[in-house]
Image (cartoon, rainbow, N blue to C red):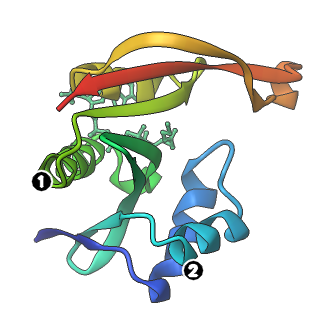
Amino acid sequence: MIKIRPLVDSNLEQILSIENNAAPFPWSKEAHQDAIIQQYPSLVLTQADMIAGFIVFNYYLDECHLLNLVIDPSFQSQGYGKKLANKMMEQAREKGMKTVILEVRESNSSAIKLYERLGFKQIGTRKNYYRGNLKQDLAREDAIVMQKPL
Ligand SMILES: CC(C)(COP(=O)(O)OP(=O)(O)OC[C@H]1O[C@@H](n2cnc3c(N)ncnc32)[C@H](O)[C@@H]1OP(=O)(O)O)[C@@H](O)C(=O)NCCC(=O)NCCS
């Protein structure tokens, strides 16, 4: 049984474990703690009470900013990323947001596919936005900026 509910403080360790399993450039514990302290809206998707993934976003004026979306590798490619992003957009619409914006590494093809599938369009790039991937000998990496009207 799949459920989507708000992330609560006590989920921190599970979220960190998913982040470290799944994301090539994981958010630090401090970044997650800060998001909780700042009360960024955040949701977890559970399957049979196990957290399969989470999404963190924020509202600024009439814009929703998707900050982080991670699905545990053992739960990927089952539509859960899409479900979480759709739920975020539903909540943002209810809050009166007019648009969603996000940045994604230009090498992150699975995330870019997901966002395109959801109707996001590239509106620009941010040069050297991310720290690099040493394995690929990249000092910095560009971000693709994507947007979707709500
Ligand atoms: C990106 C991520 C969140 C996708 O989550 P997911 O639950 O596997 O994605 P979904 O199953 O909902 O897939 C939705 C769509 O995305 C696309 N997609 C997802 N993963 C893909 C992959 N590995 N290759 C190609 N397309 C992919 C598909 O088009 C899919 O749509 P379809 O099934 O209707 O064709 C997941 O891979 C992840 O956690 N990655 C590591 C963290 C990360 O990079 N987050 C994004 C930060 S901006």
Figure quadrant of the N terminus: bottom left
Ligand 1 found in image quarter: top left
Q: Which kind of residue does numbered mark 1 sit on? A: Glu
Residue 70 disc label: none
Q: Quadrant of residue 105?
A: top right
Who's the residue at 27% across and 45% down the image? 85
Residue pictured at 54% horizontal, 18% vertical: 144
Callout 2 amino acid: Glu
Element assignment for label 1: helix
Mark 2 and mark 1: Cα distance apart in space: 30 Å
Label 1 residue near ligand 1, CB within 8 Å = no
On the image, the x and y values in percent for residue 145 come to: 49, 20
* Residue at numbered disc 2: 13
Note whether 67 is above or below 74 in the view shown.
above
Image spot of residue 58 (x, y percent): 42, 53
- Residue 91 at x, y percent in the picture: 18, 55
Camera-side residue of 140 and 40: 40
Give the labeled residue for mark 1: 94
Above or below 59: residue 147: above
| Residue 40 shown left or right of residue 47 in the figure | right
